[in-house]
Image (tube, coloured by chain):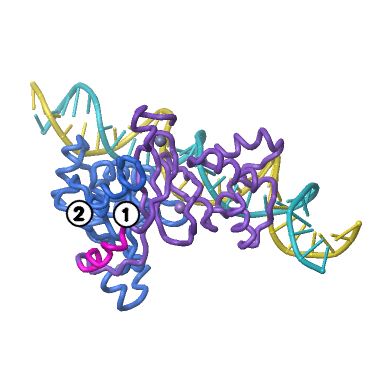
Chain colours: A purple, B blue, C yellow, D cyan
Amino acid sequence: MQRYIRMLREGKFKITPRREAILAYFMKEGKYATPEQVWKKLRISLGRLGLPTVYRNMEEMHQLGILVKVEGAENRFYYGLCRAEDPQVHHHHIICQGCRKVQEVEGCLVGSLSKQIEAKTGFKLTGHTIYLQGLCQSCITVDGGGL
Amino acid sequence: MQRYIRMLREGKFKITPRREAILAYFMKEGKYATPEQVWKKLRISLGRLGLPTVYRNMEEMHQLGILVKVEGAENRFYYGLCRAEDPQVHHHHIICQGCRKVQEVEGCLVGSLSKQIEAKTGFKLTGHTIYLQGLCQSCITVDGGGL
DNA sequence: GCATAAATGGAAATGCTTTCCATTTATGCT
DNA sequence: AGCATAAATGGAAAGCATTTCCATTTATGC
Ligand SMILES: [Mn+2]
Ligand SMILES: [Mn+2]
Ligand SMILES: [Zn+2]
Ligand SMILES: [Zn+2]
């Protein structure tokens, strides 16, 4: 938690109850969620909470590297906590299709292949985004988990 | 062209002037585009053309594997023509950030690494989506191309 | 404590995408 | 060629995730 608070401070953001609550939510859940899902949950304990506030804060946290952002089905965006030691260091994530848990995948999947890709296509690679879907240990066994 | 027409037929879709026009658009442009961009262009020559028709047809073509669908910035979706011999055979695409040209990248970037990923994460991989961004030959030289 | 810029919430706006439905059209079959 | 029929189409309206506005509240440094 302190880690993420520090990242917010470094980004010149104030530490507010709403931001702490959002961080706590993701620390506890460990799964990816939409701003609306977070809002519905936190609204209860926080009394008052605006949906735009949740959208704003989650997007800011994404910009800071605290949250991963992925496009789910149905044209909505989901966010999950990035647990890498240093989120700035390029890496990827895999998301469980059963329970929506997010897990780090260290290293870059494209790095070692980039030369080949550039040779074959004639393009110069400037960036990439990878969405890995899978099933986590517990969802493999119970087949379906929690979704 | 005939290739794509055949794919439509196999999907039980009728061959209409609108569908032919959309295919022709992508054959000619070779770049990715939003339904709205396609609509604005085709509306002129077709006289009458509904934006929902373009959305519907492009999404159907995407389902058939004729068009690639990517999320551009600003939360909009872009489509580009898939030129692989057999679109059903898994492969990837790279998109030029300069001129938006779409090009095939044969083979799978994850395939050879999947065992490693599964070993490291404990997840079982079930799928993946890769967005490769780059600069095509002509956009490398003129730095910026056409965007 | 105080000043001040940042954060917040509720309402309203945005804007991409989809739905509705009456009308038109492609296609298979006489 | 003519017909029947399910599919396709367009215009208007609706949906809906996300953003913007702005008056009020609050975190933070001094
Ligand atoms: Mn991460
Ligand atoms: Mn392709
Ligand atoms: Zn799981
Ligand atoms: Zn280019």
Q: Does the magenta run of residues contain A79?
A: no
Is residue A116 toward the left or the right of residue B54 in the image?
left
> Considering the numbered disc 2 on the image, is that residue within a helix, a strand or a loop?
loop
Quarter holding residue A138:
top left
Q: Which residue is at the far bottom?
A: B141
- Measured along the vertical axis of the image, is residue A56 above or below residue A136? below
Determine contact: label 2, label 1, CB under 8 Å.
no
**Residue drawn at the location 60% of the way across and 34% of the way down:** A41
Quarter holding residue B13:
top left
State the extent of the magenta-drawn residues as a range: A109-119
Q: Estimate how packed mark 2 is, as few (under 14), some (14 to 19) or many (20 or more) residues with alpha carbons within 10 Å.
A: few
Q: Amino acid at mark 2?
A: Gly
Q: Position of residue B25 (x, y in %)?
A: 26, 56
Residue with the mark numbered 2: B107
Q: Marks 2/1: CA distance?
A: 34 Å
Q: Tag 2, which chain?
A: B
Q: Amino acid at mark 1?
A: Leu
Pointers 2 and 1 within a single chain: yes
Q: Main secondary structure of the magenta part?
A: helix
Residue with the mark numbered 1: B42
**Residue drawn at the location 37% of the way across and 73% of the way down:** B144
Q: Position of residue A69 (x, y in %)?
A: 47, 50
Which image quarter is the C terminus of chain A in? top left
Please name whichever residue, B35 or C10, is drawn nearer the observer in this view of the structure. Answer: C10
Is residue B33 toward the left or the right of residue A39 in the image?
left
Residue B48 in view (yes/no): yes
**Disc nearer the start of the sequence (2/1):** 1
Q: Tag 1, which chain?
A: B
> Considering the numbered disc 1 on the image, is that residue within a helix, a strand or a loop?
helix
Residue B36 in view (yes/no): no
Please name whichever residue, A35 or C27, is drawn nearer the observer in this view of the structure. Answer: A35
Between circles 2 and 1, the one closer to the viewer is 2
